[in-house]
Amino acid sequence: MEQITIKPQEAGQRLDKFLRRYLQEATSGFLYKMLRKKNITLNAGKAEGSEILCVGDQITFFFSAETFRKFRGDGKEEGTKETELIRQSKEACQIWKHMPILYEDEHVLLASKPAGVLSQKAEACDLSLNEWFVGYLLEQGEVTAQSLRMFRPSVCNRLDRNTSGIVICGKTLRGSQEMSRLLQDRNLHKYYLFCVEGQMKEGKTIEGYMWRDEKSNKTCILDSPCPGSRKIATSYRPLVTGREGTLVEALLITGRTHQIRAHLASEGFPLMGDYKYGERKQNDKRKKQYGITHQLLHAHRLVFPTLTGAMEGLSGREIIAPVPAIFYATGIPIKSGREMHRS
């Protein structure tokens, strides 16, 4: 007989899904048969598999030790995906050991991602914020190789490689689910800072339709919908105006890939350093003049709504990621600190 107790990072998922991860060498048919015959029980009682697990729930396996090890796959540890994940995670954690952490509790962690770091890997060999996050939790003793089989902590929102700022990471399934719900419901207000070419005199809310060319990974802004297009809305206001550029704050009303970059460029205000949506000649000038090599776009602050329960620690809070140093090298007289976006 073997017995396990559900931990916070494992709670919130269906029993049958948990069992498929925990006994990774067993078939679904075998697992349901064991549930029917009460060779697998939940809190000492019969279970169907559809039950949602809670912290402290106890699952008991009435198997022989040999059978239990077989279906756990304990003899196949070397070379498994978990082993490679742990190796990459420890490497990423060492590379980015000074990653700024803005907030952390039992369920979530908010980090300030530097430009140049992937939110999620694009290729199997990539290291990203996801690997750093798992490595950090391994280092803190909050996850183990075994627990990663049942739930893999990961980022909840993605930023482009060269966009810096706040990334939400779910430490537990419940944390990931709650943050995903907030992002989908648009109850979480996301503000971005960016530097644009030209002198912006006033802010406004703009709407349009975004159509994405998958081959070029570039989007077009349209006045009317077409097949495959999606409606977008962006609210922005200038904060500081310099001789050649403006520091702008935007609130994303919708959240589409490249929305700010494409939408502002369509208004005649391309982001400094943005070779995809701006002019190469102008960006080459900024590169030589200020050392700007990528778009100056920063996920600057999050404003959370009233929350209860597990997320109460973030209720009504404003989380701010410091402005990257490159913004101050643009010649725009940018203020520092929280006063900037309240000017």
Image (tube, rainbow, N blue to C red):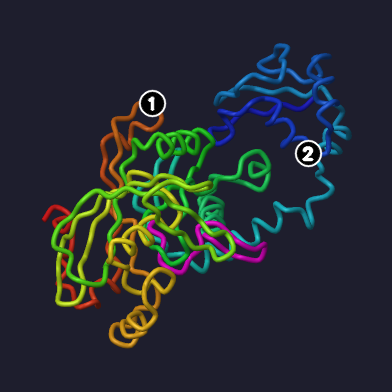
Question: Magenta stretch: residue 155 in it?
Answer: no
Locate residue 41 relative to residue 55 in the image: left or right.
right
How far from the left and from the top, in percent, is residue 166? 37, 54
Q: Residues within 10 Å of mark 1 (few under 14, many from 20)?
A: few
- Identify the residue shown where x is 64% and y is 26%: 14
Locate residue 133 relative to residue 198 in the image: left or right.
right
Residue hosting label 2: 24
Give the mark, 1 or 2, whose residue is nearer the N terminus: 2
**Relative to 280, does residue 43 appear above or below in the rendering?**
above
- Identify the residue shown where x is 81% and y is 25%: 31
Query: How much space separates mark 1 and mark 2, taking CA atoms?
Result: 32 Å
Are the residues at dot 1 and dot 2 in contact (C-beta closer than 8 Å)?
no
Q: Which of 159 and 141 is in front in this view?
A: 159
Residue hosting label 1: 309
How far from the left and from the top, in percent, is residue 145? 66, 48
- Identify the residue shown where x is 60% and y is 45%: 152
Predominant secondary structure, magenta span: loop
Locate residue 48 relative to residue 134 in the image: left or right.
right
Q: How many labels does the image show?
A: 2
Magenta residues span: 111-128
- Identify the residue shown where x is 55% and y is 66%: 216
